[in-house]
Amino acid sequence: MLNTTLCYITRGDEVLMLHRVKKKNDINKDKWIGIGGKFEFEESPDECLLREVQEETGLILTDWRCRGVVTFLNEGGTGEYMYLFTADGFEGELKECDEGELRWISRDFLDSLPKWEGDKIFLDLLWQDAPFFLLTLRYRGDKLTEAVLDGKRIR
């Protein structure tokens, strides 16, 4: 299983989002996602988070918290454990990202952007300030076929 981090950095009622339009053969092509990436060898979740955020945005996080773990399962593919974070403290200047376009988006507008079907589930949990959660999202290609939150099937 692949280990990754994903972070939603907030500034007031805005969220820093990455529109994935620059990488070739990108599973996230044309989707809007948070900031994050794959663990490097012997890296902890928070070390991965801090490195990925700085590499992709130029920002240095000063206040963050882990909100849950999302397990992605895809028929015929490899699985992924994603450590999900939010952050509202940071320093530095936003830089250009080589994976896509960074943009501050109003949370009210976020639902209208193209993203993975399961992202809406964990974004709703984040915005409701839900306690730490375990979420399993099962996909068949791009289609979400099952969602299980803390052991209870919700879809």
Image (spheres, rainbow, N blue to C red):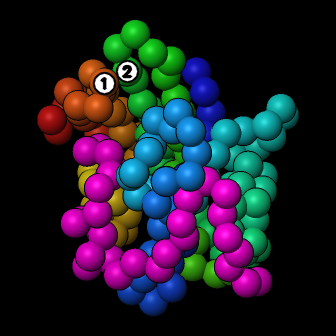
The earlier-in-sequence mark between 1 and 2 is 2
Q: Give the range drawn in magenta.
A: 91-119
Q: Residue 127: which quarter of the image?
A: bottom left
Q: In this view, does 72 lie to the left or right of 118?
A: right
Circle 1 residue: 141
Disc on res. 74: 2
Q: Is residue 34 visible?
A: no
Residue type marked 1: Gly
Q: Where is residue 47 in the image (x, y as percent from the top left)?
A: 78, 52
Residue at position x 67%, y 57% in the image: 98
Residue type marked 2: Asn
Residue at position x 71%, y 55% in the image: 52
Q: Is residue 46 above or below residue 87?
A: above
Q: Residue 112: which quarter of the image?
A: bottom left
Q: In this view, does 41 lie to the left or right of 133?
A: right
Q: Where is residue 81 in the image (x, y as percent from the top left)?
A: 53, 33
Badges 1 and 2: C-beta atoms under 8 Å apart?
A: yes
Q: Position of residue 66 (x, y in %)?
A: 57, 57
Residue at position x 49%, y 54% in the image: 21
Residue at position x 35%, y 33% in the image: 136
Q: Position of residue 72 (x, y in %)?
A: 42, 30
- SS at mark 1 in the image: loop
- SS at mark 2 in the image: strand
Quadrant of the image for the N terminus? top right
Is residue 99 on the magenta stretch? yes
